[in-house]
Amino acid sequence: MLYDAMRNDHGLAIDPFKALVVPRPIGWISSIGADGNVNLAPYSFFNAMSDKPAYVVFGSAGRKDSLSNIEETHEFVCNLATWDLREAVNATSATVAREVDEFELAGLTKAQSRYVKPPRVSETPVAFECVYEQTVHFAAHAKDSGYAMVVGRVVGVYIDDRFIKDGRVDTAALKPIARLGYSEYAVVEDVFRMRRPD
Ligand SMILES: Cc1cc2nc3c(=O)[nH]c(=O)nc-3n(C[C@H](O)[C@H](O)[C@H](O)COP(=O)(O)O)c2cc1C
């Protein structure tokens, strides 16, 4: 098939788009609002866009607490979503009032970040401490809709030393989870190597 994506006339029961952009890494974003509320939520419209310096982006499908907090206080942390923490990742996606602390909701503990105020998830082996740079609005949505992309510069990288072997991060040992379509996920457990041509 080939369908008109603006009309979304795929004729399927569920929109297939997200099942086609896979696997999507999950930014498990912690942030603090101007009033001090602590927030944690997973975002799979998430990726790194550059290194040296490193930049990450995530997409908010509407005005969510993470977007509001980050625009207020200009900092956030991207925690790695892992197989061991999959239930907690899911629990923090619940739609709850802004004052609810999802760390508490999911039984997670906070570790103090070094360069930014929002805490990282102490149970996860990797976290990026980020400074907000800009919100990119999408032309198809009203500017106040909250459908937008947040761009952040990574200013601190936390790695649990147990996952560094012979000078390299053991990615498979981290068991990162990633989002597919529907309610499907993937887990990275196998890796293969391929060298670029000269
Ligand atoms: C694995 C996973 C990935 C998600 N990715 C996104 C996303 O990319 N963008 C989005 O707006 N919501 C996404 N959600 C839903 C949000 O996590 C959910 O709306 C959450 O309540 C937002 O929290 P906040 O209002 O505290 O920021 C995702 C949920 C899950 C479980």
Image: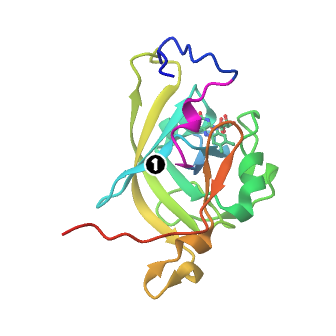
Q: Position of residue 66 (x, y in %)?
A: 59, 39
Location of ligand 1 given as a quarter of the image: top right
**Viewed as shown, does residue 9 lie left or right of 95?**
left
Front position in the image: 87 or 198? 198
Front position in the image: 54 or 134? 54
Q: Secondary structure at mark 1?
A: strand
Front position in the image: 24 or 153? 24
Q: Quadrant of residue 112?
A: bottom right
Q: Image point 62% across, 16% down: which residue?
A: 11
**Viewed as shown, does residue 150 lie left or right of 54?**
right
Q: Name the residue furthest left.
A: 198
Q: Image point 59% across, 29% down: which residue?
A: 16
Q: Decide if residue 109 is in sight here.
A: no
Which residues are the magenta region?
14-24
In the displayed structure, would residue 144 be above or below residue 57?
Answer: above
Q: Position of residue 3 (x, y in %)?
A: 49, 18
Task: Tell whether position 45 is magenta.
Answer: no
Q: Image quadrant for the C terminus? A: bottom left
**Which color scheme did the rendering employ for the protein?**
rainbow
Q: Decide if residue 156 is in sight here.
A: yes
Q: Position of residue 86 (x, y in %)?
A: 73, 56
Q: Quadrant of residue 177?
A: bottom right
In the displayed structure, would residue 4 be above or below residue 81?
Answer: above
Q: Image point 61% across, 68% down: which residue?
A: 189
Q: Image point 51% across, 81% down: which residue?
A: 164
Q: What residue is shown with label 1?
A: 47
Q: Position of residue 82 (x, y in %)?
A: 65, 61
Q: Name the residue furthest bottom.
A: 166
Tell me the kind of residue under disc 1: Asn
Secondary structure character of the magenta stretch overall: loop
In the displayed structure, would residue 12 be above or below residue 22?
Answer: above
Task: Tell whether position 19 is magenta.
Answer: yes
